[in-house]
Amino acid sequence: MLNRDDAYNRYIQWCEFISDNDLIEESKKLTDDEITERFSDFISFGTGGLRAFMGAGLNRINIYTVARATQGIANSLNYGAKVIIAYDNRIKSKDFAETAAKVFSANGCEVFVFDRIMPTPLLSFACREMNADLGVVITASHNPKEYNGYKVYNSDGCQICPEAARILEEYIASVSMYNDIKWNRQEVNFVPESVISSYYSKLSYPDLSNLRVVFTPLHGTGKETISEILGRTGLVLHCVNEQVEPNGDFPTCSIPNPEIPDTLKLGIELMESVNADLLLATDPDGDRVGVAVCDESGSRILSGNELGVLLFDFLCKTREIPKGAVVVKTYVTTNMVKTIAMRYGVSCIEVPVGFKYIGDYIGKLEQKGMLDRYFFGLEESCGYLPNTFVRDKDAIATSLLICEMAAWYKLRNMTLCDALNDLYAEYGYYLTALKNYEFYGDLGRQTIGRIMDLLRVNNIEGWLVEDFRDREDYSSDMLRYTHDMSSITIRPSGTEQKIKVYIATIEKDEASANERMNQLNDFLENHIRNSNKVV
């Protein structure tokens, strides 16, 4: 971290170099404090790649920081390496994709770019389908409109894991933004339409003509692909007109995250007005999907955990379970998955937080000749993968599976709520909640580290604590406290400046679970916030 004078010198060098008119004008208006904040350090490259506010500065996403990252990554590749690039609907996403394509091409890579916005799962699929060496997606997923990002995928179509990210970060750190970047673009190709058609061909399209569905892509990339696959099933599809067209300003939802109830408001209103069976909502880059359901008691938003256990149980009920089958979940995903897995003789594998670890586990199965054992993968934040030809969460294939599940239960005069209640009656009421503590700027990053250190040495009296930081199978900072049938799991976000706290409990019924959850919430606030461990 540089001091104020050094940051200002970097700012002067930046202003003398840049040629982008928007960035020039923005740079002129920066205050002294903003200069210090934006030029004290470069944007970090982690397991989520790059993700930050767009704008002028070394720790912002702009064409120059994108070019620097791309040059570093290109330096790690062999000459002639095949690279595929996708981008979403966000402001500047296409510009950043073009910048990355220019730099990769100038470094001798064979570059393919999708000719229009495309969901992340298609990039993952294309990496495998086209035998690529590397994939890049320009997206900030479900973050607000001010953000953008740069995610990197390996030849398996899996987002890179920590060790690969660390190596790339070293390559990027060695690049001078002002002297080392090659910009003289050679030839760039478009990804063939046959790749998209091949993805569609790998899905099954049951007759779902008994189903009425509302869909919203939340102004993102999902319109084309979701409309295509659902249209092949015969179901009645209603789209949320205010949100169906791509728009990087996200005018109807300030945070385009299908986990947030306010984000689903328009979709729920349409679902109720047309008497649809369910609402599907995909995030901007089309890898997460959220669901709301209509039944006799009104509308209900299913949590990521609830939808996940419904899908897993449905697959167990309706598919042939292979010998040695595994379901793969992240550590913070509901343990109800484990209980259902035991019922059906499926092994439950737990991996660190981040869907890349699920994709990586599939790759390890493939290397051992055991790919057929993969049955399902899920994470609590609305991420699911019902296949192995994609190696990241896939809202496209999952949306099709959700509709198949809803239609299957409808034939049995049941809603998804009915099905979920039956699971709770059989296995116990598993209730989960997520709390976020947000921090901002350089001070915020330091505060997050301090909080985790304090939590590590000040354990909760009477609770067992598990520290994941030093485990061989876990590379991130995470703590889990357990007591009786309840747990509190605390970890810094890998992509945002926040601490995420996952609360889970198991009781015999909903009323008891809610009562216990309220107690845990109060306990959490008193123990953590009031003891100045979270500020």
Image (cartoon, rainbow, N blue to C red):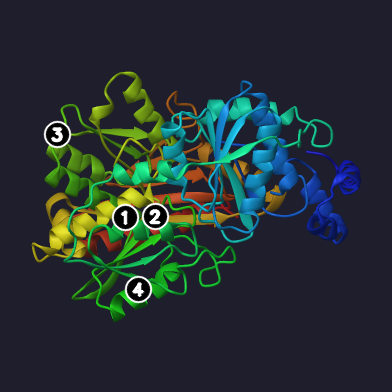
Amino acid type indicated by mark 2:
Thr
Q: Give the mark nearest the N terminus, 1 or 3.
A: 1
Q: Reply above or below: 69 against 256.
A: above
**Residue 23 as seen in the image, left or right of residue 164:** right
**Dot 3 and dot 2 residues touching (CB under 8 Å):** no
Amino acid type indicated by mark 4:
Ile
**Residue 387 as seen in the image, left or right of residue 359:** left
Q: Residues within 10 Å of mark 3 (few under 14, many from 20)?
A: some
| Quarter of the rendering occupied by the C terminus | bottom right
Q: Give the mark nearest the N terminus, 2 or 4.
A: 2
Q: CA distance from mark 4 to mark 1?
A: 22 Å
Label placed on residue 225: 2
- In this figure, which residue is indicated by the disc labeled 3? 345
Q: Quadrant of residue 411?
A: bottom left
Residue farthest toward the bottom in the current orientation of the protein: 273
Amino acid type indicated by mark 1:
Ile
**Dot 2 and dot 1 residues touching (CB under 8 Å):** yes
